[in-house]
Amino acid sequence: MPNVRERIEKVISENPVVLFMKGTPEFPQCGFSGQVIQILDYVGAPVVGVNVLEDADIRQGIKEYANWPTIPQLYVKGEFVGGCDIVREMFQSGELPAMLSDAGVPVKTQAGA
């Protein structure tokens, strides 16, 4: 069985947009995870949610993987973007849809649209 780091790397490498979150995209279990899902939904980015509440190893492992202490954590094309505050700031500045688009992720909302 693959170790936690290998499992994290596999999901990040196989999906263009991954959110390690509490709950699921359909049913977020915390406000911060819910905010990031709302933002990604608004810009139209397809997201794969990984529910850290279902797997304690992933919940701890993702914090160590990114050296980032909080959840949610957003990854785009294998790169760590940030948590809720960073995603919200990038969305408000128009940087998030541009970054997603530049990474080849289809979005419906561009900055200023």
Image: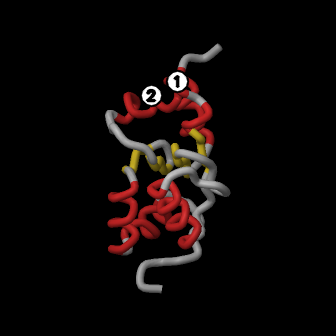
In the rendered image, the vertical position of residue 7 relative to residue 12, given as above or below: above
Per the image, label 2 sits on a secondary structure element best described as helix
Residue at 59% of width from left, 31% of height from top? 10
List the residue tagged with mark 1: 57
Q: Which mark is residue 60?
A: 2
**Residue 18 x %, y %:** 55, 47
Quadrant assignment, res 45: bottom right
For residue 40, side relative to residue 26 (left or right): left
Task: From the top left corner, tell me how far across and down residue 39 is, in percent.
Answer: 50, 67
Three-letter amino acid code at the position of disc 2: Gln
The quarter of the image holding the N terminus is top right
Q: Nearer the viewer, residue 23 or 7?
A: 23
Q: Is residue 67 above or below residue 20?
A: above
22 displayed left or right of 79: right
Q: Give the residue at x 53% y 31%.
A: 8
Residue 106 location (% of width, % of height)? 59, 66
